[in-house]
Image: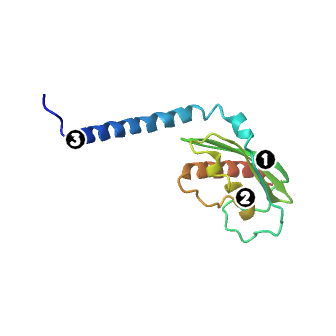
Amino acid sequence: MSKLNNKWVILCTAAIGLTYSAGYAVTNTDASNASVKGYSQTSIQQNNQKTYSNSTQSGNSNSSSSTSQSNYKNGTYTGQGECKFGAVAVKVTIKQGKINAVEITDCTTSYPESAIEGLPQEVVDRQGTDVDNVSGATFSTETFKTAVMNALEKAKG
């Protein structure tokens, strides 16, 4: 019986590891998509909710946001965005025609809510959805922006 060369053992081990990793990535994404519609993490995420509000109405009226408008109706509006990695739901509060507060009410994306937790304050500061992309959580950022745009559509006067 001949002994295998160490290079072959390392090569085979690496090939098996890559195959396993690729399979895990594909099946993990599919598992996340299955829970998108049901929002199975709702109760967990509600314990981690954070609200961001505009305490100084000194206005960023020079914002170049695509959704920055001052003709919103006062009230609280909800919106939702979905992507292949999950969903984000938000609550947007309008006071005096301006975005006063944004809250992530549900986040079932593959990345944790903490990856995008700074975005609500950016929406308030910039008075629109022209927020910075979060590196490594691009789909979560886009899903958040879609949710806010959905809520702002309802708030249009």
Residue under numbered circle 3: 6
Residue under numbered circle 2: 121
Question: Residue 120 vs residue 17: left or right?
Answer: right
Which image quadrant: the N terminus? top left
* Residue 115 percent coordinates (x, y): 61, 51
Question: Residue 100 vs residue 148: left or right?
Answer: right
Q: Residue furthest left?
A: 1
In the rendered image, the vertical position of residue 116 relative to residue 98, given as above or below: above
Circle 3: residue type: Asn
Q: Rate crowding at label 2 as few (under 14), some (14 to 19) or many (20 or more) other CA atoms within 10 Å.
A: some
Circle 2: residue type: Gln
Q: Residue at x 82, y 54 (%)?
A: 94
Task: Using the rendered image of the protein, determine whether residue 156 is visible from the camera's viewpoint.
Answer: no
Question: Residue 5 vs residue 21: left or right?
Answer: left
Q: Residue at x 45, y 39 (%)?
A: 25
In the rendered image, the vertical position of residue 68 relative to residue 14, given as above or below: below
Q: Quadrant of residue 6?
A: top left
Please tell me whether mark 2 sits on a helix, a strand or a loop.
helix
Disc 1 to disc 3, C-alpha distance: 63 Å
* Sequence-wise first label, 1 or 3: 3
Circle 1: residue type: Tyr
Q: Rate crowding at label 1 as few (under 14), some (14 to 19) or many (20 or more) other CA atoms within 10 Å.
A: some
In the rendered image, the vertical position of residue 38 relative to residue 84, given as above or below: above
Which image quadrant: the C terminus? bottom right
Please tell me whether mark 1 sits on a helix, a strand or a loop.
strand
Residue under numbered circle 1: 77
Q: Residue at x 56, y 49 (%)?
A: 139
